[in-house]
Image (cartoon, coloured by chain):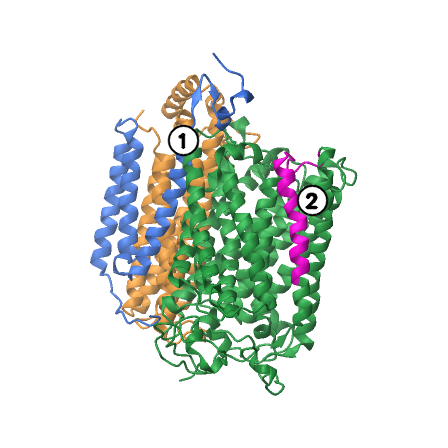
Amino acid sequence: MRAEATAPALKLPEKHYLNATYGIRSWLLTTDHKRIALLYLASVTFFFFIGGFFAMMIRLHLLAPNGYLLTPDQYNRMFTMHGVTMVFFFLIPSIPAILGNFLIPIMIGAKDLAFPKINLLSWYIYILGGAFTLWSMVNGGLDTGWTFYTPLSTIYSNSAVAPAVVGVFITGFSSILTGLNFLVTVHTMRAPGMTWFRLPLFVWAHYATSIVMILGTPVIAITLGLAAMERVFGLGFFNPAMGGDPILFQHLFWFYSHPAVYIMILPAMGVISELIPTFARKRLFGYHFVAAASLAIAVIGFVVWTHHMFLTGQSTYAAVAFSFLTFIVAIPSAIKTFNWTATLFGGSISFDTPMLYAFGFLGLFMIGGLTGLFLGALGVDINIHDTYFVVAHFHYIMVGGAVMGYLGGLHFWWPKITGRMYPEWLARIAAFILFIGFNFTFFPQFIVGIMGMPRRYHTYPPEFQIYNVMSTAGASILAVGYLLPMVYLTWAAFYGKVAGENPWPATGLEWKTQSPPLTENFEVTPVVTWEAYDFHNRPDLGLDVPSGKGSPGVVAPAHGDD
Amino acid sequence: MHRTGSLYGQFKTLEQQKDTATLGMWIFLVTEVMFFGGIMLAYTINRHTYFHAFAMGSNTLSLGLGGFNTVVLLASSFTMAMAVWSAQTSKKNLITLFLSLTILLGFVFFGVKYVEYAQKFHHHLVPGKNFDIFYCANNPAKCEDIDAADMAKEKEELEAAAKADPDLNAHAQLYYSAYFGMTGLHALHMVIGAGLLFWLLKESVAGKFNAEWNNPVDIVGLYWHFVDIVWIYLFPLLYLIDRHK
Amino acid sequence: MSEHEHTEHIVSPGMYLTIITTLLVLTGITVFAAFVNLGRFNIVVALLIATVKATLVVLIFMHAKYAPERTKLVIIAGIFWLALLLFMTLSDYASRVDYRGVRYPMTQLTSHTIEHRG
């Protein structure tokens, strides 16, 4: 039940971060974390379109088994640039740089991040890296696969490898600086009373993500740096002719790129940890376990990378060790999933759009995660490595998981970011369209992968065509599911119904500020005396929620000031 | 723009600001550890696989110059630490003195490195088309900076290495890839450090640092010490392979 | 927890002098040891001495000895992750089996894919 159904029409606050200053310079030279988040929103969405374009080319080409649309070289370029764009320029920055940047200072009661100027710098670095990569795309493209395996990337490829590698290298620093900013902010900028175990799990998730960014990204930086130097100057670490080893490249590459997938999923899990308590009106079950699981995923995620290399001539001993660790890393994810589900039990559930995305996440992430175990099993992997089974697996997690989390979060916090509500029914329809389109796109890929269709091949045996046609049809539905929110969210930012301070209602410090927030977030620094997700203790929210067992009995102040 | 020593808007106290900046620098240094770690891994694997080529390459390096540079950098860490102490005890002129000494020592290091690099170019020891580990042995007249005794020793070592490793020239390129890669990255970091030191010098001359506020000196110091630590490892790894022959 | 008072511990110039002298001595020992034939232990000795030097720089020059616990955790995490990168990758290289010049990869489990060699 929403309180504002019977309340008088709300008005936007007079002063907020969007109208505090005007002009393009006030945006391009801003140090306000909220404006920087919107700068990222614009640029990340731009790259999402580019990555989507390449996806469209892939799916159109695969409608027929005979490679009718693109030459093999062109096809190689399509899947490579789809991967590079989506991984480095969409998935990795999306939730942290947009939602993380916007929300973390507010969630912890601070005026801004620890290093606001470095925050702005990280956006410019992202743009510079993107520019190099775009340059590569229009000057010959890139055909090495997003994994840049040597010696194809360093010696034999005729595509524009060097600028692309430089672009990704540069963008890595954007990631590092964001992670650094988040880590330091959470350590030193929390408001009085905001202890570690009162933090929203969204913050814990980003803390864990930042650990991965800090420890992993420099390794891909040096790896790509060495690859670039090999291509341009003839250094030889990965060149067999000089005694170098392509497997060394793979080790160095995957040491980052496996933890990178946790950079992509942990923030989405953080979003889900906010959505489920809100729309079940119940405290998150097992807060400490979910927080610990986030850290566990970040740490264990660093010791499984060789599962991408099972077929490179590893010894059985090494393979068994990494396979075992791969199974272990699934456990904290499972713990989280159990805790989210347990939160639903006995809750008062509503099906607002963000919750629809959360449900979608739960189901699709589970499928994606479990199929990862298939791939981690040595014997099975021999047969399904480099097939569409892998492609389906990671798209279930990246798209079914991370992108669902991203969209759910965007919807959930859109009223806070813009002060206005999106159209609820249209949004629910779009969520359904997306869910249906997604499954039609990627489920057939599991089947066709098991049947043996290799990935990254521009043709396939004709008996697989029906599945590919289904997948392409699904992709066009999925595209509609993506386009609709882009349109109505943009519309809603200007013309949506004014949302007020706490439209859902939700707990969390960000819902105690005006929508949109002030530039300095809080008029007075809040003093926190309550636990996270304290629905049982918040009569001011107007919810019909029973008091929880063992609740501290402290009535939280209605506003941040004291 | 905020001036050094004044409280930035997002902080509540100067103490919080100092704590935050220091933690930020330490975390940044961890990223640098992982960054250099990658090339250290490449070095480790190749040194193990191609020991003879690596030993050969290492022995063409000047131990004198390398050792001298090590002393220079260690001394610069000392002067940097003294600069921090001077700031902590509000001795303005000493801050300027020690920062200047640190910069000077840094430039001495660059000078020596330049001499070393130039020598490598001259001797055809840069990875690429012109690389030839046998160049000086085959053309002693062209490598006049190697005296006769050293030349004889080098020829001997080359012969032994070539016997142990028929592909010596190819594998030696890997050594020099590591040499230029590691020392090049290190030098790049030193250039950035020198830039930061120049900025500190300017601020210290303007009297910005004292016992109450000296955080920038402290955190640039952390960065500079880290660059010194990298060299502490690079010196034995690159210059001291199999020297006892 | 975001505000905690700790008075700054100022390390004395005398201590710095002691450390730099020690570092120079250790450098000398490193060079000297390089000319002694210790076989495969040359590298071990060299790295050990380098680590001692690095530790002195971190603890005293970088004030890590007097830093809050959090800083020490950051340092240890960095070293630990570097060790992860090095040792786990090296374990793959170390465990690769070369038999009669042929690498026996995981595909030996599906033995019909490779010809049997005696």
Q: Which residue is mark 2?
A: A78
Report helix, strand or loop for mark 2: helix
Say which residue appears at 49% left-offset and 14% top-offset.
C117
Q: Assess disc 1: are there few (<14), some (14-19) or many (≥20) residues with their C-alpha within 10 Å of its C-alpha.
A: some
Provide residue C24's location: percent of width, then percent of height: 26, 45
Q: Label the orange chain with its letter.
A: B
Provide residue A161's location: percent of width, then percent of height: 63, 42
Q: Nearer the viewer, residue A321 or A77?
A: A321
Res. C64 image quadrant: bottom left
Which chain does tag 1 point to? A
Task: Measure the alpha-carbon separation of dots 2 and 1.
Answer: 37 Å
Q: Is residue A289 above or below residue A370?
A: below
Q: Label the green chain with its letter.
A: A
Which residues make up the magenta segment? Answer: A431-460
Q: Is residue B97 above or below residue A373?
A: below
Magenta highlight on residue A444: yes
By secondary structure, the bulk of the magenta-drawn segment is best described as helix
Say which residue appears at 25% left-offset and 64% top-offset.
C10
* Earlier sequence position, callout 2 versus callout 1: 2
Question: In the current view of this chain or complex, which residue is farthest to the front?
Answer: A346
Question: Quick one: quadrant of the C terminus of chain A?
Answer: bottom left
Amino acid type, residue under disc 2 in the picture: Met
Q: Tell me if I can see residue A65 in this picture.
A: yes
Q: Nearer the viewer, residue B196 or A462?
A: A462
Residue A317 has which mark?
1
